[in-house]
């Protein structure tokens, strides 16, 4: 059985794992008015208006963290009030057949707050990608994928570490994080560890996948090797679909050379909430 790489996930694949830190920062101008900054938050230093699309001259990590707190709470509100009855067209709008799993459904709800890549870049002060098919909004139909800007990912990691130093912010956002992000964040971190358990095997897998992406090789046929990993994660309470998507996310991050930065950011995020979880993955490639 062939395991062809799934269609590239939206740019939020990595970002949505760090919603309090990155993806939802882009939504700042559209935060519901009812969600106000907590009174005990220290004032942010002045910075450029994100809605202008003009990057701030220097990165204000405190402001980024303040925005992300409001926006995580905004996402929580949107998710809590999503439509109880689902019509068939939602699958097309989500570019996914999964309503409650995966990053595409989460991204779909985040766009209700007018998510755009230029806004995200403005707030973090760095372009999200150095190349790829995405413009103001993700191109979810492309066979190509976005190559992340290492400087952008480094700022995501910096903001994640700042979250870990702000215990009050952690506690205010913990319920929303646990409802919508914890499982996927833990899945992605553990998949990274599982893939790198055998460096020689992984190097071959990466080379095969890279050849598939550039058109010089066939579809990836590694189902027999990946099935133990997928099954182990599912038995541990994670999901088959999210684990499968994470495998190819990390392959693409190794190709664009941002995997280590993303892993550091993801680990910092989970450590901030005390949710690092298991030290070893529940399944390994066969």
Image (cartoon, helix red, strand yellow):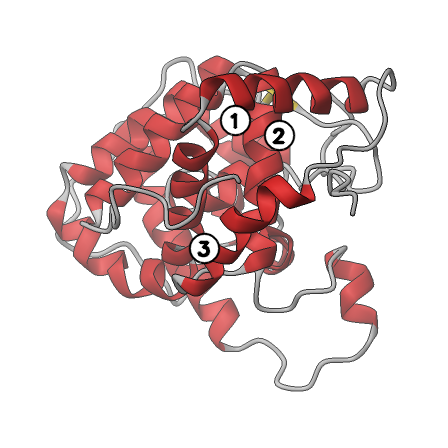
Tell me the residue at 41%/65% (across/down): 237
Q: Secondary structure at mark 2?
A: helix
For label 2, the residue is 118
For label 1, the residue is 122
Q: Dot 3: within a 10 Å radius of its alpha carbon, few (fewer than 14), some, or many (20 or more) residues? A: some
For label 3, the residue is 232
121 up-or-down from 176: above or below? above
Mark 2 and mark 3: Cα distance apart in space: 38 Å
59 up-or-down from 191: above or below? above
Tell me the residue at 55%/16% (across/down): 149
Question: Answer yes or no: do the residues labelled 1 and 3 have beta carbons within 8 Å?
Answer: no
Q: In front of the other: label 2 or label 3?
A: 3
Q: Secondary structure at mark 1?
A: helix
- Which percent across, then down, holds residue 8? 72, 37
- Which percent across, then down, holds residue 262? 43, 27
- Residue 241 showing in the rendered view: yes
Tell me the residue at 50%/20% (across/down): 55
Front residue of 144 and 122: 144
Front residue of 203 and 174: 203
Front residue of 223 and 51: 223
Front residue of 225 and 84: 225
């Amino acid at each position: 059985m062939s395991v062809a790489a799934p269609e590239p996930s939206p740019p939020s694949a990595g970002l949505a794992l760090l919603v309090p830190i990155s993806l939802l920062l882009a939504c700042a101008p559209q935060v519901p008015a009812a969600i106000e900054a907590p009174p005990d938050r220290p004032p942010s230093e002045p910075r450029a208006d994100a809605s202008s699309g003009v990057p701030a001259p220097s990165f204000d990590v405190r402001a980024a963290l303040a925005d992300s707190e409001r926006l995580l709470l905004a996402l929580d509100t949107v998710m809590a009030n999503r439509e109880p009855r689902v019509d068939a067209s939602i699958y097309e709008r989500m570019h996914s057949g999964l309503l409650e799993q995966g990053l595409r459904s989460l991204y779909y709800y985040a766009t209700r707050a007018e998510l755009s890549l230029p806004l995200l870049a403005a707030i973090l002060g760095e372009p999200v990608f150095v190349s790829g098919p995405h413009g103001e909004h993700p191109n979810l139909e492309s066979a190509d994928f976005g190559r992340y800007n290492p400087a952008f990912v480094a700022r995501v990691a910096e903001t994640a570490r700042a979250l870990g130093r702000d215990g009050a912010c952690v506690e205010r956002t913990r319920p929303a994080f646990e409802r919508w992000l914890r499982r996927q964040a833990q899945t992605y971190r553990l998949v990274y560890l599982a893939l790198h358990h055998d460096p020689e095997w992984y190097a071959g897998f990466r080379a095969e996948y890279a050849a598939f992406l550039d058109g010089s090789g066939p579809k990836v046929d590694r189902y027999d090797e990946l099935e133990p990993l997928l099954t182990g994660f599912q038995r541990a309470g994670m999901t088959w679909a999210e684990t499968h998507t994470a495998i190819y996310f990390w392959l693409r991050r190794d190709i664009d050379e941002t995997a280590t930065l993303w892993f550091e950011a993801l680990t910092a995020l989970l450590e901030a909430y005390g949710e690092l979880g298991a030290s070893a993955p529940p399944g390994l490639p066969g």
